[in-house]
């Protein structure tokens, strides 16, 4: 990743600028509320400053939203231990059940505390699940399990991948929506 060498300071916010071979300017706010401008090399700093000023209401609103979201996602050590224990009791059973149903077996099942993804499948077909899945309904958990099992056969998100999921979980789209709440 390119290292930001310049930055803007607007309304008390420090906004790094990353210049790359891209076509358009983008303002990004990450999950922690950090703001970043991505820009083509040829766009002048003055133009980026003007662009950021025009978007300042959106930037401030989005930064606040991400900070509130982050505050909600703080857990005590005890709560994290309880989540992990529950995940270790529930998820491997669901993986075993759906593994038999779908006919795909993972090389391993691991529980972690990933905050940006609910599950993943490694190149060696090891499935990883976030303990934070336990904060969602069982239907959503089962969807993530089937989704990750499908990655054992298809390491992508192709039509065939989703057809496999739909074969065993016809309502997968509704279940996936539960993860957005």
Image: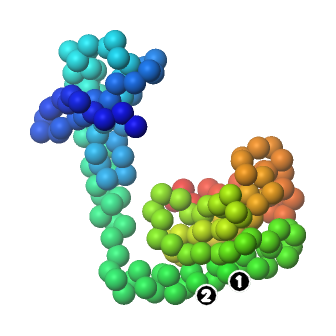
- Residue 62, position in %: x, y? 32, 43
**Contact check, label 1 and label 2, Cβ < 8 Å:** yes
* Horizontal side, residue 66 vs residue 136: left or right: left
Residue nearer the viewer, 139 or 81:
81
Residue 67 location, quadrant: bottom left
- Could you say which quadrant of the image residue 111 lies in? bottom right
Q: Residues within 10 Å of mark 1 (few under 14, many from 20)?
A: few
Are there few (<14), some (14-19), or many (20+) residues within 10 Å of tag 2?
Answer: few
The residues tagged by marks 1 and 2 sit, at their Cα atoms, a distance apart of: 7 Å
At 36% from the left and 28% from the top, the residue drawn is: 38
> Can the viewer see residue 25 in this picture?
no
The x and y percentages for residue 80 are 41, 80
At mark 1, the secondary structure is helix
Q: Is residue 155 left or right of residue 69?
A: right
Q: Which mark is residue 108?
A: none
Q: Is residue 27 above or below residue 93?
A: above
Q: Which residue is drawn at the image coordinates 56% and 81% (left, top)? A: 87
Residue 162 in view (yes/no): yes
User: Residue 158 vs residue 26: left or right?
Assistant: right
- Element under disc 2: helix
* Colouring style: rainbow
Check disc 2 and report the residue beneath it: 89
Which residue is at 72% across, 47% downward? 157
Counting the numbered discs, the total is 2
Q: Which residue is mark 1?
A: 93
Task: Give the residue drawn at x 12%, y 39%.
Answer: 12
* Residue 110 percent coordinates (x, y): 59, 75
User: Residue 42: x, y in percent?
Assistant: 34, 12
**Residue nearer the viewer, 115 or 175:** 115
Furthest residue toward front: 124
Q: Is residue 73 above or below residue 91?
A: above
């Amino acid at each position: 990743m390119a290292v930001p060498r310049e930055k803007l300071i607007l309304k008390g916010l420090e906004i790094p600028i990353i210049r790359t071979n891209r076509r358009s300017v983008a303002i990004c706010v990450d999950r922690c509320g950090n703001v970043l401008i991505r820009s083509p090399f040829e766009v002048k700093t003055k133009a980026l400053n003007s662009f950021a000023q025009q978007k300042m209401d959106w930037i401030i609103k989005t930064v606040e939203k991400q900070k509130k979201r982050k505050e909600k996602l703080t857990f005590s050590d005890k709560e994290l231990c309880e989540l992990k224990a529950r995940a270790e009791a529930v998820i491997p059973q669901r993986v075993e059940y759906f593994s038999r149903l779908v006919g795909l077996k993972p090389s391993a099942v691991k529980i972690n505390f990933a905050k940006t993804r609910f599950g993943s499948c490694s190149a060696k077909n090891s499935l990883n699940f976030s303990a934070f899945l336990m904060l969602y309904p069982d239907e959503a958990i089962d969807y993530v399990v089937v989704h990750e099992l499908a990655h054992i056969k298809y390491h992508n998100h192709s039509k065939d991948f989703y057809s496999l999921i739909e074969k065993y979980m016809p309502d997968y789209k509704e279940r996936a929506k539960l993860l957005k709440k």
